[in-house]
Amino acid sequence: MSDVLRQAPRSVNFVTEGISAVDVMPSESLSRFAPVDIDFYLRRYPDVGDAGVDPTDHYLIAGRREGRLPRDEAEILRASQLVDENYYFINGPDVHASGLSAVDHYINHGWAEYRRPNAYFDGRWYRDRYAPPDSMSPLCHYLVQGEALGYRPSLYFDPDWYRTAYGIAAQESPLRHYLENRRDRRVSPLPLFDISFYVTTYAAELGRARDIFAHYLTVGAAREFDPSPWFSATQYRQTQMVGKPPPPGAPDEVMRNPLLHFLYSFVILAGR
């Protein structure tokens, strides 16, 4: 493994995530996309009003843990801007026939069909890994709870590392920031993907590509492009992938991509 990881700089921390359950989260962790709508909460959960409990207090102390919604789910998703309408329609042409908006379709049908609301949120991954309640979509759970806990929206986005690396404020969404800025060729979704190195090394191959990590996923990995100067894709494939069974429960894309294979095998399965 030392030949594969060529002297990674100390600033790259491969131990990026803990997934221990948190029963009570502080009020500061409330997503700006989902403050408690008191009228909605009392209407949706009349037992709270019957008990004479303040809706915000109830949500913070018990409701969030119980899988209750702080406000209408469609409002949460629209405010987050994490449902990429163009992406959703392009990857689901049947949505047009339904007459529903991307947000409404995702809430009523899409998440249960494992459709992605954007390129970097994988609902199947999220549900398998974190087991959110069925009372809301996986994306909604990520917004009201998961992101604050450092849950990954997909194998290849690390919100805790991203928040620290790019100085994202506590009330801001790292995933939203990345989606809004990824085409600037300056931000990376992972510590092991050195975007400056990749853009410089493979400039002739990139052409007009704007989402550089997407280029790596769709083109670079298959051509053994290195994601950073300290990760040898060719050596990793030869020593860790060729002739070896896939890691238990690995998504199909893991066996096609040395970087994702490393992340899944040595970070995710190791519980780090």
Image (tube, rainbow, N blue to C red):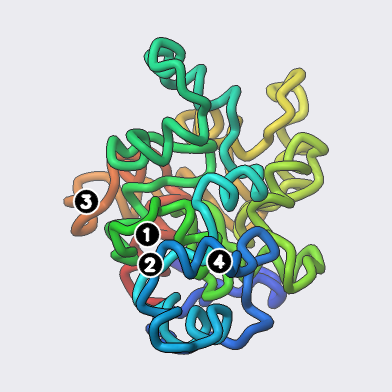
**Can residue 6 be seen in the rendering of this structure?**
no
Residue shown at the point (47%, 34%) measured from the top left = 104
Mark 3 = which residue?
246
N-terminal label among 2 and 4: 4
N-terminal label among 3 and 2: 3
N-terminal label among 4 and 1: 4
Q: Which element carries disc 2, helix, strand or loop?
A: helix
Q: CA distance from mark 4 to mark 1?
A: 19 Å
Mark 4 = which residue?
147
State left or right for residue 271 relative to residue 103: left
N-terminal label among 3 and 1: 3
Residue shown at the point (67%, 48%) measured from the top left = 79
Residue shown at the point (45%, 79%) measured from the top left = 49
Q: CA distance from mark 3 to mark 1?
A: 10 Å
Name the amino acid type tagged 1: Tyr
Q: Nearer the viewer, residue 134 or 44?
A: 44
Q: Nearer the viewer, residue 72 or 23?
A: 72
Q: Are marks 1 and 2 in contact (CB under 8 Å)?
A: yes
Residue 35 lies, with reference to residue 116, above or below; the image says below
Name the amino acid type tagged 3: Pro
Image coords of residue 203 (percent x, y): 77, 28
Residue 214 lies, with reference to residue 7, above or below; the image says above
Q: CA distance from mark 3 to mark 4?
A: 28 Å
Residue 96 lies, with reference to residue 234, above or below; the image says above
Image coords of residue 230 (percent x, y): 62, 59
Residue 88 lies, with reference to residue 263, above or below; the image says above
Residue 268's label in the rendered image is 2
Mark 1 = which residue?
264
N-terminal label among 3 and 4: 4
Name the amino acid type tagged 2: Ile
Image coords of residue 209 (percent x, y): 71, 24
